[in-house]
Structure formats: structure tokens, C-alpha cells
Image (tube, coloured by chain):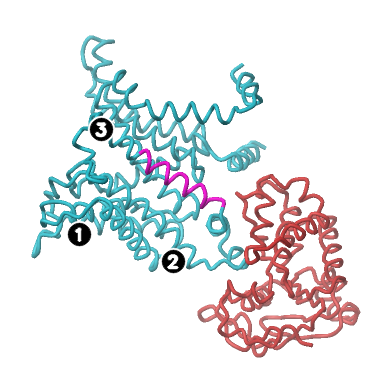
Amino acid sequence: MKLLDVHNLKVHYGGVNAVKGIDFHLNAGEIVALVGANGAGKSSTLRAICKLAPHSGKLFFDGKDLAAVKSHDLVRLGIALVPEGRGIFSDSSVEENLLMGAYIHNDAKIKTDLEKIYTLFPRLKERNQQAAGTLSGGEQQMLALGRALMSRPKLLLLDEPSMGLAPLIVKAIFDVLKQIAADGMTIFLVEQNAGLALELSMRGYVMESGNIVLTDSAPALLQNPQIRAAYLGQ
Amino acid sequence: MVKKILSAYCKLPYCKVISSLLLGLVLLTLPFITDYALGRIWVRILDFSLLYIMLALGLNIVVGFAGLLDLGFVAFFAVGAYSYAILGSPHLGIHLPTWLLLPIGTVLAGFFGILLGTPTLKLRGDYLAIVTLGFGEIIRIFLNNLNAPYNLTGGPQGINLIDPLNFGGISLSQAGWFPAVYNYYYCFLVFVLLIIFTTHRLQYSRIGRAWVAIREDEIAAQAMGINTRNIKLLAFSMGASFGGLGGGLFAGFQGFVSPESFNLMESVMILCMIVLGGMGHIPGVIFGAIVLTVLPEALRYLGPLQNNVFGKILVDPADLRMLVFGMALILVMLLRPAGLWPSPIRKQEFDEAIEDSND
């Protein structure tokens, strides 16, 4: 079953065409990576899905047309975004950040959700009363991820989760993503670090200057000599 | 030593109850003490401090909580004051009762808040500041010029002989047991406590958290499901309505309003109260409002002080007053960049930033 279905998506900022009419989809329970170089249009694609960039084309989520849906209503449908650069609320405490993630909910389950996040990221529990802005980059990424999970999403959109982080921390975060995926979450991963992203994913799309140029299963992409040369430096 | 005593005190049972009782006692007897120690004029300054606390707490919602820099806040104060003045004075011959006048001013100011908020939704930072500054000036200039063709606001002469605050047939200006300034003190105190209670509850509500989220990161806030447009408008109108209430009380207290009272300097002062006190932190904002109301008045004594020390007045105290005041502001911002009394979490961050820059 297709959870997210995108047809002929175009993104244009004034005269610049960042995304030039792409089609792709995500099946429920899949981890799909969108990889490509700087400026290929990956983040623009993600921003368009979240209604944060001017775009045209058709977007369907869970069979529902997203044309009339406002950005802030997406999370109610079950789409959670972990924004690029993490976008945590730095003056609020770690726990307040997580509770903001549950903004659309108002029930007793929030408490158990919070405990779940703390089990996934024990570091966040240690620092739950600390200002989020005082966390390290890796901890902030964990917080952004935890906050997104607090909304109980069906689809998790991640924009460059490895950006600016030490390899060990990136590995820790990707391990958690693996755990979340094993529980049946659908994940759409936008990454520059193609090797890492494809190792985690089941399928992948490769973007180049606004177009999807290649799509295949992730292991096949990892073996593809073109990809190896262009993105994996081998 | 002081810290030790304080922490020992805080361990006592009922320490909170005792503190609240003490605070209540001080607040109740403050006008008597002030009058006895410093004179009647200082009770009046006390009244103004309370008014400014209301305004500062109103602006704090917009600037401190939602992070929307507003340099035209005094416009809402003016709307509240003028609506009270126009509907409760011989100027047009309308004399509505206070219990109607105050809500009208509050709601009208809230409406003006939305009026300002709607076109500025997409603006942030400097750009928003410029538009709000313009808005504040527009209101003031309107008030200054709306004496023709129909004399609505009295123009530059303002409106005189405004009805004093009157609750249940008891006018606060017709001294009962106490002098009028005492009556106004207690009346304002009740409103201030009401506003403190409201802002405090708001801060820890879903709305309060949504405001903070918008301040910190608007895109992330949207991703959390916050309708940023409505929540921003709510901040504008909520803050404005506090300003409007303060304006109504001001008009009833002064008995006279004119456009002069609502210039840009007032907006800047209210903003200073928040920044100096500790943005977004209610006790800090209250403290800042008191300091910035009392300090300029206290500095008037620079003249007599020079007379005592040097035997003559060396520098005109009127000039010196603003100089010392400005220097005091700069010193505070240098020594306590997060404000005089910042919220604990904000202080944490500022300390961290200072440590980082020292590396």
C-alpha cells in the first residue's frame, strides 16, 4: 500500500526551478532514502511535502489529497518532520521540547510516549530539565527525533540527520532509526551521506539537479558502479 | 551568609505560606509606609509603577513569549485610554459606567492588536519592529488630528475632566477613608494581581508553549501542528488587551489624556522594562517595570544631592538625570546580559554562551 504518493512535483523559487517534476512513492513500513549532491533538490522536495516551499504537482498521503492541507495540519494526519538543522526550541527544557512534539495530543498516553523516548535516548532523560540549547549537536538531533516521534506519526521525514555530527553519534542515531523502523514506522530519509542512508534503507532514489535520475533497491544502488563513483568515492 | 540563611529558611515548614503572608502584608501597607517615609508624591509613583507593570506584562506576551518585537505597544495603551476618555467625560457628554468602560477599552485594544497583527504575520525581527513602530506613530498622529472635521479626540489639547474610576457608586477620587492615591493603589494592585495570575497561567498552558515554540523556531513549531497564524494573532491581541486595560485605568486615574503621553519614548521604555528585567520571566518583568518607573523619579534628587555635597548645583539635574539613567541601563546590560532577574533556563543559556566566547 502506498503511504505517500508524489506525482510530477515541481518546486520553484522565483525563476529558479529546484525540483523539475518528479514522481516517487513510499510504501507503508518502508525506509526510503533520497540521496544526491548539494543543490540537487532533496531538501526542496521535503519542504514541498511539508508545504513549506512553493510547489505544484499532486501529493497523496494515505490516499488523501494534500492539496488543501495546511502545513500545520500535516502532523494531525500523521506526518512528522525532523527539520534540517534540527530546529529544537533552545530556550525550553528538553522535556518541554518533547511535550511540544505531543502538541496535537491531549491524553494520558503522552506520559508513556515520553518514557519510550527516554528509553530510546537515555541521554535525554539525564538532561530532561536542561535548556535544549545547551545540548551537544548529537543530543539535539536525538531531541529533534524524539520530539517528532511524540506526535505518534505514521510517516517520519528526516532532513539530513547526520549533518555536522561525529561518525559515532551518527551511528547511534541511525541505530535508533533502525529500531523505530523495526517497529513498523515508515521513514523517508533525505541525506547527503549516501552510503549511510542506503545501508539503512530498503529502497533509494538518486536526485541530480532537480530530477530523479535513478531508483532501485538500496543494496543494488550500493553496488551500482556509477553511484559508487559519484557518491561513495570509490 | 545570606544564601545560607535563605536556604535554611526555605527548609522551614510553611516557609511558602509565611513568605506569601509577609509579601501580602508589605503590599497592603506599602502606600502608608511610602507616604510616611517619602511623601505623597511617591504613592503616586507607586500607582504608576503598577500601571507600568500591567503594560510590561502585556508587552511581555508579545515580545517575551512569542518573540515578536513590537515597538508600537503604546498605541494599545492609547486606544484603551482614549476609549475610556471619549466614552466617560463631558467631551462628548457620554458618561458610561466604569464597569463598561474598562471592558470596552480592553476589547477595543485587543481588536487593534489583531489589526496590527494581520498584515505583519510574515514579518520578523527588524522588519516587524519598523512596521509596529509606524503603527504606534499612526495611532498617535490620528489622536493628534482627529479634532476636525469632527472633534472626537480633542486633538493636541486632549480630553479633560475624565470620569474617575467608579465601582458600585464609590468614586476612587472622592476620598473615603484614604486619600485618592491610596484608593487607586489598591485598585491597580487588584488588576495587577489579576494580570499576573492570567499571564502565569497562560505561560504554562498549551498556548504559552506554542508562543515559545514560535519564538524559537517557526518552522519546527508548524511541524508540531501549531497554527502559527492564529497563535501569533492571539499573542498580539492578548498583549494589546492588557495594554488597553492599563490605558483605561490610566485615563480614569489621571483625569486627562493627550497624545503626548503616548509617544515612541513610552514604547521604548516599556520594552526596556522587559529587556532589563528579564525577557519572558514574569517576576523579572515586574521588577524591571518597577525599577524603570522608580529610577527616573529617584534621579530627580540629583539636584538636591549636588546642593548638599558641593553647596551648589553644578550640572542641571534635568540633563544629568537622563545621562545617569542611560548609563545605568548600559551597565545593567553589560553586567547582566540576560536581564536583572532572568528565568533560570535563560540564564543557563547565557552563561553557556559567555563560556563559549571565552574559549
Q: Nearer the viewer, mark 2 or mark 3?
A: 3
Q: Viewer-proximal residue, B53 or B306?
A: B53
Coordinates of residue A112 in the picture (x, y in percent): 77, 59
- What is the C-alpha distance between the residues marked 2 and 3? 41 Å
Please tell me which of labels 1 and 3 falls first in the chain: 1
In which quadrant of the rendered view does residue A113 lie? bottom right
In which chain is the residue bearing label 1? B
Mark 1 touching mark 2, by CB under 8 A? no
Indicate the amino acid at tag 2. Leu
Residue at left 40%, top 30%?
B27
Decide if residue A116 is on the left or right side of residue B34. Answer: right
Q: Which mark is residue B121?
A: 2
Q: Locate the N terminus of chain B and report the quarter of the image it occupies.
A: top right
Decide if residue B138 is on the left or right side of residue B237. Answer: left
Q: Which mark is residue B142?
A: 1
Which residue was labeled with disc 3? B181
Decide if residue A66 is on the left or right side of residue B33. Answer: right
Indicate the amino acid at tag 3. Val
Q: Which chain shows up in red?
A: A
Identify whether B334 is placed above or below A135: above
Q: Which chain shows up in cyan?
A: B
Q: Are marks 1 and 3 on the same chain?
A: yes
Please tell me which of labels 1 and 2 falls first in the chain: 2
Q: Tag 1's secondary structure?
A: helix
In which quadrant of the rendered view does residue B62 lie? bottom left
In which chain is the residue bearing label 3? B
Q: Which residues are magenta?
A: B189-204
Coordinates of residue A178 in the picture (x, y in percent): 86, 67
